[in-house]
């Protein structure tokens, strides 16, 4: 019996100056474990006049995770953090009851054409922590657990697996693992996975259950414990997932919550300019009309 429950194809989404590849949410699968939103950003050439200039915007009820393969982004937030995100580092911002941040091309790169490529991810918070105080952590690449087995390189970006634990302070049981194969390899991780599990193919080819899959696809497992697949040489994949929440989740714009009233309040606060400001960045993104998918529950 097949263990592949669904295959999600990357879809184009407009975030202003850029088109990104939207992976989650998907109409047939709103979440995978606590992962509620994944965008594949780039690869895109950044040059005058097209810079990344995402003005201050708010979040509630989630943690954002930015992980770059190429390029650089300047992160500023209402907690007073100003950090340049570089490839291999993990930028982890927990919004809780409310935070504001901006994402822009660093000043020193605005005169130098360069490529920007990475993943931007939202991880929903457990219900009891949705209104926690916001916080921010930046983890540099050397701090992330990494190991090699049978010619395959593993890096644990967030969470815990196989007695390895990332320093990223997650708030529910989850994992995000980078796997790179220099040679053909068979990957058997099922004994170490838990909850729901998805596999995103960034580069190369994956064979599973007699089928071939390529870049810009997510394979969602019916049973994480049965996770087994083959990677061709030069393939890079990301396995993510964890324990799903018992409650449904709702999304409106940049807000995530387990009840619609909380989203309505956040929308009004942003419209009334009541969210905290970002020091050194006085931009503002007007809130769009109410999301037509508001109230759509997650798949269990």
Image (cartoon, helix red, strand yellow):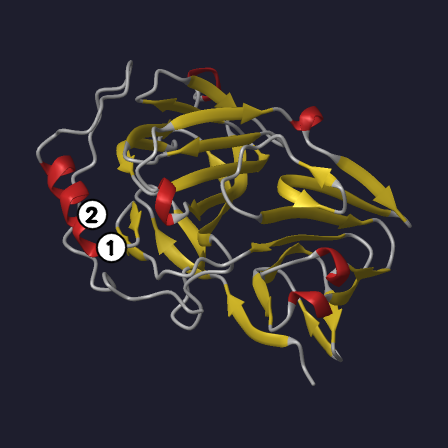
Image quadrant containing the N terminus? bottom right
Residue under the image location 37 percent in, 40 percent down: 129
Asked which secondary structure carries label 1, the reply is: loop
Residue under the image location 30 percent in, 40 percent down: 60
Q: Is residue 246 above or below residue 104?
A: below
x and y percentages locating residue 252 in the rendered image = 25, 52
User: Image check: 177 left or right of 296?
Assistant: right
x and y percentages locating residue 162 in the rendered image = 76, 47
Residue 112 appearing in the image = no
Q: Pointer 1: residues within 10 angstroms few (<14), some, or many (20+)?
A: some
Q: Nearer the viewer, residue 102 or 241?
A: 241
Tell me the quarter of the picture where residue 11 sits. Answer: bottom left
Q: Is residue 204 above or below residue 98?
A: below
**Mark 1 = which residue?**
259
The single residue placed furthest to the front in the displayed view is: 128
Q: How many numbered marks does the figure carry?
A: 2
Q: Nearer the viewer, residue 290 or 174?
A: 174
Q: Nearer the viewer, residue 60 or 77?
A: 60
x and y percentages locating residue 133 in the rendered image = 34, 28
Residue 129 appearing in the image = yes
Residue under the image location 50 percent in, 28 percent down: 113
Q: Pointer 2: residues within 10 angstroms few (<14), some, or many (20+)?
A: some
**Mark 2 = which residue?**
262
x and y percentages locating residue 273 in the rendered image = 12, 30
Mark 1 and 2 residues: CB-CB less than 8 Å, in contact?
A: yes
Q: Is residue 231 above or below residue 67?
A: below
């Amino acid at each position: 019996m097949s263990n592949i429950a669904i295959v999600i194809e990357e879809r184009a989404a407009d975030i202003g100056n850029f088109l990104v590849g939207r992976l989650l949410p998907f109409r047939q699968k709103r979440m995978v474990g606590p992962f509620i939103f994944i965008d594949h950003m780039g690869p895109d050439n950044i040059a005058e006049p097209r810079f990344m200039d995402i003005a201050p915007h708010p979040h509630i009820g989630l943690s954002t995770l930015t992980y770059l393969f190429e390029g650089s982004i300047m992160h500023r937030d209402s907690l007073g953090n100003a950090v340049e995100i570089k490839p291999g580092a993990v930028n982890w911002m927990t919004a809780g009851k409310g935070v504001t941040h901006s994402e822009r091309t660093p000043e020193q790169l605005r005169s130098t054409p360069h490529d920007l490529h990475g993943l931007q991810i939202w991880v929903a918070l457990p219900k009891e922590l949705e209104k926690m105080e916001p916080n921010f952590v930046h983890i540099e690449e050397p701090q992330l657990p990494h190991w090699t087995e049978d010619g395959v390189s593993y890096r644990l970006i967030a969470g815990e697996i196989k007695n390895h634990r990332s320093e990223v302070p997650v708030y529910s049981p989850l994992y995000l693992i980078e796997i790179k194969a220099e040679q053909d390899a068979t990957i058997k991780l099922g004994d170490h996975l838990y909850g729901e599990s998805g596999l995103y193919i960034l580069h190369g080819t994956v064979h599973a259950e007699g089928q071939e899959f390529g870049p810009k696809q997510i394979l969602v497992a019916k049973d994480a414990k049965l996770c087994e697949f083959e990677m061709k040489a030069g393939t890079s994949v990301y396995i993510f997932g964890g324990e799903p929440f018992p409650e449904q989740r709702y999304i409106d714009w940049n807000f995530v919550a387990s009840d619609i009233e909380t989203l309505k309040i956040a929308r009004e606060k942003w419209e009334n300019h009541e969210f905290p400001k970002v020091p050194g960045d006085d931009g503002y993104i007007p809130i769009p009309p109410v999301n037509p998918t508001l109230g759509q529950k997650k798949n269990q």
